Amino acid sequence: MRKKLKLIITLILTLSSSLFFAQNHEISGTITTETGIPLEFATILVKGSKTSTTSDALGKFKISSAANNPTLIVSLFGYQTREIVAKDHFEDIQLVLENNRLDEIVVVGSRNPKKSKLETAVPVDVVNLAKIRNTTPQTTTNDILTYLIPSFNSNRQSSADGTEHIDPASLRGLGPDQVLVLINGKRRHTTSLVNYQNTVGNGSVGTDLSAIPASAIKRIEVLRDGAAAQYGSDAIAGVINLVLKDNAGFEANATYGSTSRDDGQTTNLNLNYGTKIGNKGGFINFTGEFNDRQKTNRSQNHNLIIFDQSAQGNFFAYEYADDPAQSRQIDDNLLAQNGLKRDDFNFQIGDAKIQNIQGFFNASIPLNDQIEFYASGGVSHRKGTGYGFRRLPSETESVVASIFPFGFQPELNSVVTDLSSSFGFKFKFGEWKLDLSNTIGENKFVYDVSNTNNFSLGDASPTEFKAGNHSFLQNTVNADISRLYKDIFSGLNVAFGAEYRYEKYKIVPGEEASYINGGAQSFPGFSPLNEVNEDRNSVGVYADVEADITDKFLVGIAGRYEDYTDFGNTINGKLSLRYKILDNLFVRGAISSGFRAPSLHQQYFNNIATDVVDGELLNSGIFRNDSEVAKQLGIPKLKEETSRNYSFGVVFSPTKQLHITADYYHIRIDNRIILTGNLGNDAYGEPVPELRNLFAQYGAQTGRFFTNAINTTTNGIDVVIDYDLNAGRGKLNLSLLYNYNNNQVDNQLNNIPSIFIGQEDVYYGPQERSLIESNTPKHKGTFAVNYNIDKWNFLLRNTYFGEVVRDGFPFGGIQRHNGKVVTDLTIAYKITPKLQFALGANNLFDVFPDKQIYENSYFGVFKYAPVQMGTTGAYYFGRMSFSL
């Protein structure tokens, strides 16, 4: 009996222990991408049960199962779901991105780490640059975004001093300085260049996107909504976030191209190498890029032809010829005898010559389970050569005949150096996350003017001048804290933090010969009177809460306070909503206030350039807003621009392959900062004695100022349709992008000094008004077809640039440039899985804007205006791409 009892007890204990250990069979592991990057918030479910867990910030998880070899279902939004049979106690599981690129998790627009671009309450575009770069005809970030983001526009300028060397860009038709640029979510510094050449973005200071090599960028996120309450100053039109590459492996890419006119040749070479660090998802990624772009010439009268030359060598007759073949009239032997060549008589108008050498890196190193170190940064060294207006021998007040008997065309040579560095630590304290970072960047322009003279120095004038430089430095310190409460409502994300920013702006004078008595023709150097060494700092704090009240209803609230040492403080807020009417139909909207602080450049940039007019020196100045002459005229002190943004949109996904978004926006900007017209003349160019006498006290006859002179209203709509489908053995993607944008300037000017009442068209005239209202297309649309089959990839893209209206007031006319369609075509073939070759064209059919009317074309020289698709014309390229 006792033996039977012992046997029964033994069997019970054995069965109990077996059940106990079976119920506590524990499995741990990590969830990563294919390249080893940890994935947080992945869901791990034991198949056939309700037991589940989520991965932490390092991708780690633990889960228990009653089965010895349970099947785990691993899922994460934007990634393909996997089923894994857990045969061991530890499992490394890799997830692969879904093919549909619209489902990518985004950084901007929402600080919730689980939101995709279709789930945010405001519109966000995602450009997967690492995937498309090998097949797109464009090589620079500005050019790529122009053809992929409907409300983004960028055009190369000509004869516009330093603006030729940094392409100004706009989002929703607003200024380059009303778009905030981030790199890996950290604020990027602006350039040191002020655009004062009456081109798009006149009076603004933007961020140089071309300083970041496109080959270093993994993806680009474009938040098309006001976001100053979330990110601070400049985010009135939206935010562009450049996410750097984090992949392991090696990539090499070589592109060569030329225009249909056999100029503008481009050579682009880039290398990218990344490797893992440790076994916790650490990595480091390096990029090097070389880009060389030769000049183009698109002048109406391309060649300056000599008809006759007397024995004395002092009589010349000139003729302009639109047909380059007519240049054969020139006697090449006669030119050679005089040490000349045909190019000495060209009028150069077109894209500047640019050469870029760049290096960038991106790194992340987990130090333990709770601390991660990260860093990124780079250097860009650019040399540019642009061209001023040609001086003819007949211009005896500009040309020193003994140096330039045939006249000359000045060259502006710039060296632009851009340095940046960002580093920080991410900490995890339970469910809380802390991100501490420091980001510093500097942009410096050094000017050298060549092939010109200082007329006042006569025969002793140099022909090359060091004209000075300007620089801008920005250092930003951030502390960001966040937590996701998964069990409050259907998810509550809380984020708050603080920011300290220091900025410094400098202008350094050039050599004396570059500025004295009129200075170098085309670009007089900075003088000691223009010297600037100013700085400021600001402090900001923010809070950002986003709650999924239910599975259908999302509410986001953000607020920000900032205080600047030079103009005061501001408070801004944002409310955003999204509601799921159906699982595949959302409505979304937002209302927010915003601001843009006046830049140090706008407060302190100043310059006096001297021209010779009818034998007398005429000085024209841009004066500081705090100068004595500004005070005497009653120019008000600069203050911040303020904005109110409203948006409403619909997201509809009738199938998993078809996505449609449409968003309306309304942006009201008050006290917008502009650069006035040339004060001292009336609307007909005649002198105003009272003003001339005042400016004469400060060494000038005319003057311009930065001031909060206008209010603007912007209304528009963005539509994005994307459709993926199978077509035979291949995959076909169709996309349609459309933007309507209407900018209007109020008729009433703000705080105009009494002395300028009646001269509003000079203070802020029709030309300046047209730069905002009508110099970017009101309508822009793109239809693209991308077909991939076996080893082949085909891209066909048509982009419509709508009508542009230019006003050449006071001496030019009003001209409408009709809408145009630009066609891109690329054919790519994978020779091996690692080697691809591509051929293609941007602007395949050589489309140009309408020719300018004579009044707007500088006496018939400027054949085309730099509007719509620009003046490059057809560009054909070949590209070889290699990866390991």
Image (tube, rainbow, N blue to C red):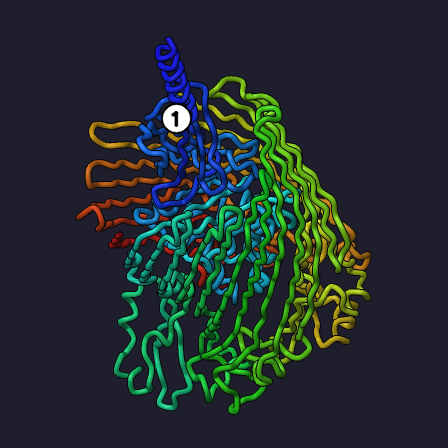
Q: Which amino acid type is shown beneath numbered disc 1?
A: Leu
| Residue 797 pos. (x, y %) | 34, 40
Q: Position of residue 120 (x, y in %)?
A: 54, 32
Viewer can see residue 812: no
- For the residue pair 459 and 191, the one nearer the viewer reads as 191
Q: Quadrant of residue 659?
A: top left
Instruction: Identify the residue at image location x=46%, y=21%.
Output: 584
From the viewer's perspective, is residue 298 above or below residue 8?
A: below
The answer to whether residue 280 shows anywhere in this view is: yes
Residue lying at the far front of the rendered structure: 2
Q: Is residue 754 left or right of residue 700?
A: right
Q: Which residue is mark 1?
A: 658
Depth check, front residue: 787 or 398: 787
Q: Nearer the viewer, residue 316 or 473?
A: 473
Task: Give x and y (percent) for residue 471.
Answer: 58, 69
The answer to which image quadrant residue 578 occupies is top right
Local packing at callout 1 (Cα closer than 10 Å; few below 14, some 14-19, many 20+) is some
Say which element carries label 1.
strand
Q: Number of marks in the image?
A: 1
Is residue 203 found left or right of 361 in the rendered image? right
Q: Is residue 230 left or right of residue 308?
A: right
Quarter of the figure with residue 191: bottom right
